[in-house]
Structure formats: structure tokens, C-alpha cells
Image: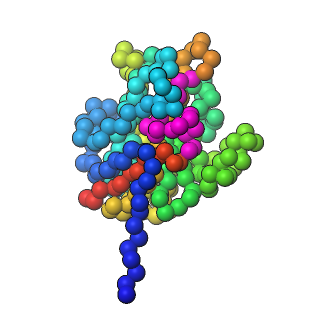
């Protein structure tokens, strides 16, 4: 008797998104990027862990697509004080100012990845072997074991100060996340997109996420979404 096919059961409250192939476009041009993602499913960031939004909460929307061996993430973030004190890649960007975060994990592995982008187009790249290792590092207040050197992924950032908005495009090789070229048709990844929105003079940032977290813990994978790669 042939073996039963492997079935991935999508459980949990996270959003479900089909990631569709995109036609070629100029990733250095904001208008071209917006047009390329026009038909992609929009995901709104929210604050599911509290009954009402925080004072100063600003909306943001994320869309996904893929081309060749790249996952493409396009985010548009309303922001009335766009800034960061970060000066280089792989700093603790979420402590230094406005930061957009991407969490990714293929459903067939325990290792996951955390990528950050700031309005100055500085990036943080973390490879985390499992949740237990992450919690140990949090207790030690370190990210050093997880840092990925070099340019693991690329990004572009646009600031529209008059519109109180900054936007970004992240291009993430599937091989970095899944360990092989891809993505394969119908492949599933867990995902979450999150944000630290700082306002100068306000002591704490406003946090938000596409995941319906019960508390503001972006590493809680039970609430992450499910991303399915559509065939060409």
C-alpha cells in the first residue's frame, strides 16, 4: 500500500494568505512596486492583545508575492514621526526607532528567521534554531548567537514625509529560509509581520502585528499566519 501523502493541517487563529507570482517590475521605483502588488492580499497590522488601540496607533498594510527564488514583502506604514537612531546593520534596531519585522518559518522545520528593516534601510538578520533557544537568549538579553553576517536579503525604502508614510520592499531568497531554492508550488510557511512605531518624546513605542497575539509577544508562533505559495 502506498504511503499516505503528508498533510499539513493549518490550525490556529493566524491569517491565511496565498502568495502569488508577480510579473517583473522595477524594485527601485515605488510606483512600479505598488502596481506590482495591487492584486496581492492586504494584511493589516493590529493590536489583538488589547481591547482598544493604543494612543498614537497608526495603520500599516503588508502584501506578499514571489518571483524566481525570492519571497517579496511590500509594507506601507503610516507614521507621523519617521525616525531611527540606528547607524549600522545588525544593531538592536527595535530599540533604536521605527522598525518593521518579518518572521518566517517553513512548516517542515523548527528553525525560523527574523528580519528587520528601518526607515534608513538598515537591516537586522537573525537565524533562530528553535523557540527554546530564543527564550534563553531573551533571558540573557543577547542576540549574538543568532546574527547572520553579510547581505542575507535586500530591501528598498521610500519615505513620503508629506503623506506621513514610509514604505519598504524586502526581497528574501527562499534558500535562506528553507535551505534550498524555491519556493515549491503549494509550499507552506508560517509568517508574521510586526512593527515598532516610535514617537520622539514618548517613552515607549506602539507595537502592532498581523498575528492575533494574546499578548505582545511576536515570537509566539501559535498565532502566526500561514503563507501558501501559488504555482506559476
Left or right, 9 with respect to 128, comes to left
Q: Main secondary structure of the magenta part?
A: loop
Quadrant into which the N terminus falls: bottom left
Residue 84's x, y, as percent? 56, 24
Nearest to the observer: residue 53 or residue 93: 53
Quarter in which the C terminus is drawn: bottom left
**Can you tell which quarter of the image residue 89 is in?**
top right
Residue at the (51%, 27%) spot, across then down:
50
**Residue 197 placement (x, y as % from top left):** 51, 24
- Determine if the magenta segment contains residue 137: no
Where does the image place residue 49, in percent across and percent down from the top left? 51, 32
Q: How is the image coloured?
A: rainbow
Range drawn in magenta: 205-220
Q: Residue at x 24, y 41 (%)?
A: 39
Q: Is residue 189 visible?
A: yes
Q: Nearer the viewer, residue 196 or 97?
A: 196
Q: Residue at horizontal 35%, vertical 17%?
A: 163
224 on left or right of 69? right
> Could you tell whether 66 is left or right of 50 in the image?
left
The reply to whether the magenta stretch includes residue 216 is yes
Q: Out of 3 and 128, give the one closest to the viewer.
A: 3
126 vs 74: above or below? below
- What's the residue at 46%, 22% (across, down)? 52
Amino acid at each position: 500500500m502506498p504511503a499516505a501523502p503528508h498533510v499539513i493541517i493549518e490550525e490556529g487563529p493566524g491569517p491565511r494568505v496565498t502568495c502569488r507570482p508577480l510579473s517583473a517590475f522595477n524594485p527601485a521605483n515605488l510606483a512600479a512596486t505598488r502596481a506590482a502588488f495591487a492584486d496581492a492580499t492586504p494584511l493589516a497590522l493590529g493590536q489583538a492583545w488589547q481591547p482598544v488601540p493604543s494612543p498614537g496607533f497608526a495603520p500599516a498594510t503588508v502584501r506578499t508575492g514571489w518571483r524566481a527564488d525570492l519571497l517579496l514583502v511590500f509594507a506601507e506604514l503610516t507614521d507621523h514621526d519617521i525616525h531611527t537612531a540606528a547607524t549600522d546593520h545588525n544593531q538592536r534596531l527595535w530599540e533604536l526607532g521605527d522598525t518593521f519585522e518579518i518572521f518566517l518559518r517553513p512548516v517542515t522545520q523548527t528553525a525560523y528567521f527574523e528580519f528587520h528593516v528601518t526607515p534608513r534601510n538598515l537591516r537586522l538578520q537573525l537565524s533562530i534554531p528553535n523557540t527554546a533557544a530564543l527564550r534563553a537568549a531573551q533571558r540573557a538579553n543577547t542576540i549574538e548567537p543568532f546574527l547572520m553576517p553579510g547581505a542575507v536579503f535586500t530591501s528598498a525604502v521610500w519615505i513620503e514625509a508629506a503623506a506621513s508614510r514610509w514604505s519598504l520592499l524586502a526581497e528574501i531568497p527562499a534558500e535562506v529560509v528553507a535551505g534550498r531554492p524555491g519556493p515549491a508550488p503549494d509550499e507552506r510557511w508560517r509568517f508574521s509581520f510586526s512593527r515598532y512605531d516610535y514617537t520622539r518624546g514618548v517613552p515607549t513605542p506602539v507595537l502592532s502585528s498581523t498575528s492575533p497575539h494574546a499578548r505582545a509577544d511576536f515570537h509566539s508562533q501559535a498565532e502566526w499566519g500561514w503563507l501558501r505559495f501559488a504555482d506559476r
